[in-house]
Amino acid sequence: MTTAAATHHPSLLRQYLVLTKPRVTQLAVFCAVIGMFLAVPGLPDLGRALAATAGIWLLAAAAFSVNCLIERETDARMRRTAQRGTASGQITPPQVLLMAGLLGGAGMLILNLWVNALTMWLTFASFVGYALIYTAILKPLTPQNIVIGGFSGAMPPALGWAAMADAVPAEAWILVLIIFIWTPPHFWALALYRHHDYEESGLPMLPVTHGRNFTQLHILLYSIVLFAASLLPYVVRMSGPAYLAAACILSGRFVWQSLALYRNYSDARSRKLFWYSILYLALLFAALLLDHWIGLALAGSMTPIG
């Protein structure tokens, strides 16, 4: 009995962890951290940055947990998500609500006490937008769910910027725009090679409602718009040549893979584009930070001492 309990307990803990969608949370928090570094000249206040990171992470984890709770019946019909604790019944709705309440409450407390009220309320608004408006209303209602609901998921750079600067200027909204445009082709690539899963779920994802060819075309069109959006930081002089070169290479490959998918579909190409899209966003934001530091280093070397 003791051995069985010991074996079961870590599995339950892992089920709770899965509900927070750790990989997606990490990417969102990474984009928020980049926003923190870009918001200030030099390095941000370490204590405040750590508090902001923890608070945003906790609220994101809470939002994803509520998402899994609302979609538990849909998840049970999909092979990819059927093993989630909420879908299998291993974790009950009251348990999820308790976990989400504790995580979200702790996140809001941290942001309010050690960061600022602006970041707390913006992060809470993102929580409501994703967990309730997108998941409960938009996702089962329209094939444009990911387009309309993508705004809340695109907010992390603005949250990080607000945490350090107590404001959300135009530069932060440019980063939000990039993620907003990136989101549909990212998710539609997944929906294409998981088409049968979404068909079984009853969710009106674009490949189910409008077919594969229509979705491939929209992925290509969005990737072209994403290429243009990725150049905006350079256009507004928020970044320099190093970022411009990285954006052209990364976005060019995104368009190229989208074009290959449009011309000759295969699940392998769709899966490849999906995974590349994750790498793309991480590398694009890393390039922004690297370019930012290069600019600061050059400015410092040109500033007279004393």
Image: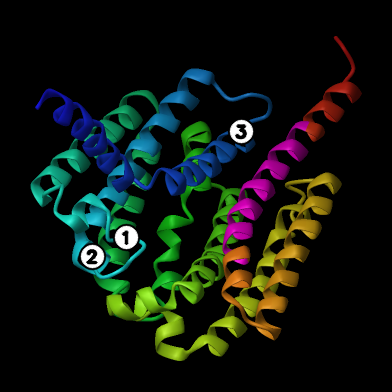
**Three-letter amino acid code of the residue under disc 1:** Thr
Q: Position of residue 85 (x, y in %)?
A: 22, 50
Q: Is residue 136 above or below residue 287?
A: below
From the viewer's side, name the closer residue of 208 and 118.
208
Mark 2 neighbour class, 10 Å CA radius: few under 14, some 14 to 19, many 20 or more = many
- Residue on which the image places disc 2: 76
Q: Quadrant of the C terminus?
A: top right
Inter-mark Cα distance, 2 to 3: 40 Å
Inter-mark Cα distance, 1 to 3: 35 Å
Asked if disc 1 and disc 3 are in contact, CB closer than 8 Å, the reply is no
User: Residue placed at 40% from the left, 39% from the top?
Assistant: 119
Inter-mark Cα distance, 1 to 2: 7 Å
User: Circle 1 — which element?
Assistant: loop
**Label disc, if present, on residue 81 of the rendered structure:** 1
Magenta segment main secondary structure:
helix
Q: Is residue 306 left or right of residue 128?
A: right
From the viewer's side, name the closer residue of 273 and 204.
273
Single out the mark in the foreground, 1 or 3. Answer: 1
Q: Is residue 295 left or right of residue 74?
A: right
User: Residue placed at 48% from the left, 89% from the top?
Assistant: 211
User: Circle 2 — which element?
Assistant: helix
Q: Position of residue 279 (x, y in %)?
A: 63, 51
- Residue on which the image places disc 3: 37
User: Residue placed at 36% from the left, 73% from the top?
Assistant: 197
Q: Which portion, as a residue range, is magenta?
A: 273-293
State which quadrant residue 41 falls in: top right
Q: Is residue 38 above or below residue 203?
A: above
